[in-house]
């Protein structure tokens, strides 16, 4: 940290990295941020922070920031810097021209979970009211869309059930497909405090993550399953709980749909779902699965925490429903210390989903086919909302390659690096007549764009983020927008230039509109948040100050619904040519595609993606620690440095995706979740070979 002087003033705001949503005091000397100090009053962090929130904010003033709009006819042409008026007029004219020639549905937008709710709201409104279609999707498509589908199908709402504090009342904690130490560090510390105080721990993960054994914490059970077999493990646990008489039948009888439970019970009791039958599929000894199931059922308070290792699979939605089934079966829902809790990746994944930036849902997860809801929006916006769902992100890419989708607005996301099967994504983006990117930097996607609109960093934004526990946190401007405009203002001006008058006096006015049109946000306003600090939605007449724990006494959908979860193996199989399975994840000091963290001092701790490989797999291939290796799948190939790691089981390799040089997603496939199209990042059959010395 460079000490720039004595702080003269400070601004309370929210970290823009992960879904923990830590509150910070940005201290300034003049107009320079001197340091970020975690806030004791922060509802999510209570004075704690991690290395990213504390130190990785320098990207806001990095020399790579794009501060002036740029346009060009072809993506291979040099950029031309222009003023805001020319850029906005150019986007509006070209979007309208595409629609005139190819129809209203030939254009769409992708919203960003890095941006504020108010910015996301503006983009989805521009699509619905100015573009006149529902072709809007959120980057949550590629991370937690199965959470939305799975929790809504079973409990009735697309959100985690508990506040973070709830973990302090848990007796048994099951962590599945998540590595909180690296990805959600401040919450991980809270969880570890509870574990050190005596809570028991089940870890379900192919890797021996830090939580399995860390100072004063040791998992009671580590179910080291093969990638792609979460559903089989969850079914085997449910089978054990039923057959061993461990279910909470009083809870099920009182709180759940009887017909759905009876059908699910018949399904789960099939011998195919026993731990013994599934041992060969999961690679986990049946006795271990049975012991873990007994521990989870015994509780008395058992809580599930999960991450992208659950959702980013071809059966991501099925696995989410499998966890919800387990919680209902054992009565572990609707009070402190229990529940099913997604650890959201990005700072505002929850919010970007809540804001109605899915192609089939308006804000608050209400389907576009609901005439009464559409009527509400039509009256407020003075423009009708289409009743048919629009395109999801992968459908947009497919349609672009096929030639029916021609114009795309990308808000703060680097799809060319982050989305799977990079070759297909690039083919789609280069097929577009108009690609507009709104971002801080000229990222991999912007390199293919026709228009680059400068975005604002979190230090310049005014708005709100919503963290993994549904907490609506204020984001306050620490410095003026270096670009001269807030992102939502730019979006409003494009919509207006296209013929739909859209304007707000402030971000606060956008939140007022969100609250007016979204029942779960009733009464939320900047003034209210400034007064009380933060609230957890749903906020309504019954709970004006929010709801830390959901489904108390009654599920949002009324009765909880058990859903059958047959295990269907992924189509991605290892073979003689691709004998290893690759899974991917994050490390503590970097963040996602690294657009921000690579432009801060954090880069000194981690400057390249490496491939973790089991010692025997390495030895078989003549690989030693630090060697360069080829990593190849059926769709692509890249080069990485190998790291021999006992954390890996034999047959499985692991890497991160923080650096464009390695471009990890060159090798990931287009397989996706059956319900939501969330990509299957977590299972790719690969071969690893030593790069011959020059
Ligand atoms: Fe930011 Fe997440 Fe770290 Fe908190 S835990 S400081 S929200 S990156």
Image (spheres, rainbow, N blue to C red):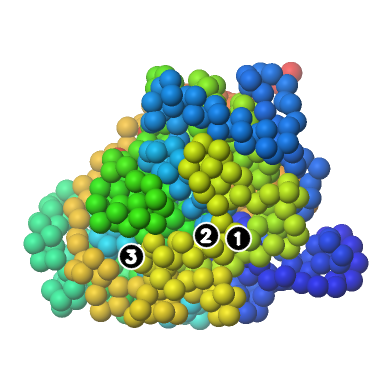
- The answer to which quarter of the image holds residue 274 is bottom left
User: Circles 1 and 2: CB distance less than 8 Å?
Assistant: yes
Q: Which mark is residue 136?
A: none
* Camera-side residue of 587 and 117: 117
| Residue 225 drawn at (x, y percent) | 38, 49
Q: Quadrant of residue 86?
A: top right
Q: 139 or 81: nearer the eye? A: 81
Q: Nearer the viewer, residue 14 or 482?
A: 482
Residues at discs 3 and 2 in contact (Cβ within 8 Å) = no
Q: Residue furthest right?
A: 5
Which residue is rendered at x = 15% and y = 76% of the image?
A: 254
Percent x, y of residue 531: 58, 80
Return the disc, 3 or 2, that comes first in the chain's sequence.
3
Q: Is residue 164 above or below residue 514?
A: below
Q: Residue at x 64, y 42 (%)?
A: 439
Q: Secondary structure at mark 2?
A: helix
Give the CA distance from mark 3 to mark 1.
52 Å
Residue with the mark numbered 1: 506
| Res. 233 in view | no
Q: What quarter of the picture does the C terminus occupy?
A: top right
Disc 2 crowd, CA 10 A, few/some/many (<14, 14-19, 20+): many
How many other residues sit within 10 Å of disc 1, few (<14), some (14-19) or many (≥20)? some
The count of marks equals: 3
Element class at badge 3:
helix
Which residue has dot 3 on it? Answer: 292
Judged left or right of residue 520, residue 113 is right
Q: Nearer the viewer, residue 210 or 537?
A: 537
Q: Which residue is mark 2?
A: 510
């Amino acid at each position: 940290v460079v000490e720039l002087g004595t702080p003269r003033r400070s601004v309370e705001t929210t970290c823009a990295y992960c879904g923990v949503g830590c509150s910070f005091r940005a201290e300034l000397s003049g107009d320079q941020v001197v340091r970020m100090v975690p806030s004791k009053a922060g509802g999510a962090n209570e004075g704690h922070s991690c290395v990213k929130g504390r130190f990785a904010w320098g990207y806001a003033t990095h020399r790579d920031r794009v501060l002036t709009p740029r346009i060009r006819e072809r993506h291979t042409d040099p950029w031309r810097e222009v003023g805001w008026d020319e850029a906005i007029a150019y986007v509006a004219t070209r979007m309208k021209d595409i629609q005139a020639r190819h129809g209203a549905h030939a254009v769409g937008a992708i919203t960003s979970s890095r941006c504020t709710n108010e910015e996301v709201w503006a983009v989805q409104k521009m699509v619905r009211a100015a573009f006149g279609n529902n072709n809007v999707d959120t980057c949550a498509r590629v991370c937690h869309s199965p959470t939305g589908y799975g929790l809504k199908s079973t409990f009735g709402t697309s959100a985690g059930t508990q506040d973070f504090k709830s973990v302090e009342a848990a007796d048994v904690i099951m962590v599945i497909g998540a590595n909180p130490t690296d990805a959600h560090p401040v919450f991980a510390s809270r969880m570890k405090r509870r574990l050190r105080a005596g809570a028991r721990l089940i870890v379900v993960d192919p890797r021996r993550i830090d939580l399995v054994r860390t100072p004063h914490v040791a998992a009671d059970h580590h179910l080291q399953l093969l990638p792609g077999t979460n559903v089989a493990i969850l079914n085997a646990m449910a089978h054990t709980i039923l057959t061993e008489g461990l279910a909470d039948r009083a809870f099920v009888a009182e709180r759940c749909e009887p017909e759905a439970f009876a059908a699910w019970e018949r399904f789960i009791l099939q011998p195919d779902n026993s731990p013994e039958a599934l041992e060969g599929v999961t690679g986990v000894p049946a006795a271990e699965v049975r012991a873990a199931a007994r521990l989870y059922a015994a509780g008395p308070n058992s809580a599930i925490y999960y991450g992208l290792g659950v959702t980013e699979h071809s059966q991501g939605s099925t696995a989410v429903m499998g966890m919800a089934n387990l919680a209902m079966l054992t009565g572990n829902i609707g009070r402190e210390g229990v529940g099913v809790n997604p650890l959201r990746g990005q700072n505002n994944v929850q919010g970007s989903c809540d804001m109605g930036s899915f192609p089939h849902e308006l804000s608050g997860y209400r389907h576009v086919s609901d005439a009464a809801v559409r009527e509400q929006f039509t009256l407020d916006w003075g423009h009708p909302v289409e009743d048919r769902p629009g395109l999801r992100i992968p459908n947009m890419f497919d349609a672009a390659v096929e030639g029916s989708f021609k114009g795309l607005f990308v808000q703060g996301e680097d799809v060319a690096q982050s989305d799977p099967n990079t070759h297909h994504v690039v083919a789609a983006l280069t097929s577009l007549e108009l690609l507009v990117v709104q971002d801080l930097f000229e990222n991999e996607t912007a390199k293919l764009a026709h228009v680059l609109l400068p975005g604002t960093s979190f230090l310049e934004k005014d708005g709100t983020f919503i963290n993994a526990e549904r907490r609506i946190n204020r984001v306050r401007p620490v410095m003026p927008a270096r670009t001269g405009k807030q992102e939502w203002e730019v979006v409003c001006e494009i919509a207006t230039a296209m013929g739909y008058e859209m304007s707000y006096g402030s971000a606060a006015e956008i939140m007022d509109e969100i609250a007016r049109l979204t029942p779960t946000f009733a009464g939320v306003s900047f003034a209210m948040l400034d007064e009380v600090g933060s609230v957890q939605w749903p906020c309504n007449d019954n709970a004006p100050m929010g709801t830390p724990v959901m489904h108390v006494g009654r599920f949002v959908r009324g009765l909880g619904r058990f859903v059958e979860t047959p295990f269907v193996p992924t189509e991605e199989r290892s073979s003689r040519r691709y004998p290893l399975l690759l899974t991917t994840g994050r490390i503590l000091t970097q963040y996602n595609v690294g657009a921000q963290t690579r432009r801060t001092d954090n880069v000194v701790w981690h400057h390249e993606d490496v491939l973790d490989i089991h010692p025997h797999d390495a030895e078989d291939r003549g690989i030693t620690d630090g060697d360069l290796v080829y990593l190849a799948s059926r769709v692509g190939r890249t080069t990485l440095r190998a790291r021999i790691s006992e954390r890996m089981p034999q047959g499985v390799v692991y890497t991160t995706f923080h650096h464009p040089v390695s471009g990890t997603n060159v090798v990931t496939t287009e397989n996706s979740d059956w319900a939501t199209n969330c990509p299957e990042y977590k299972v790719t059959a690969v071969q690893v070979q030593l790069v011959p010395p020059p």
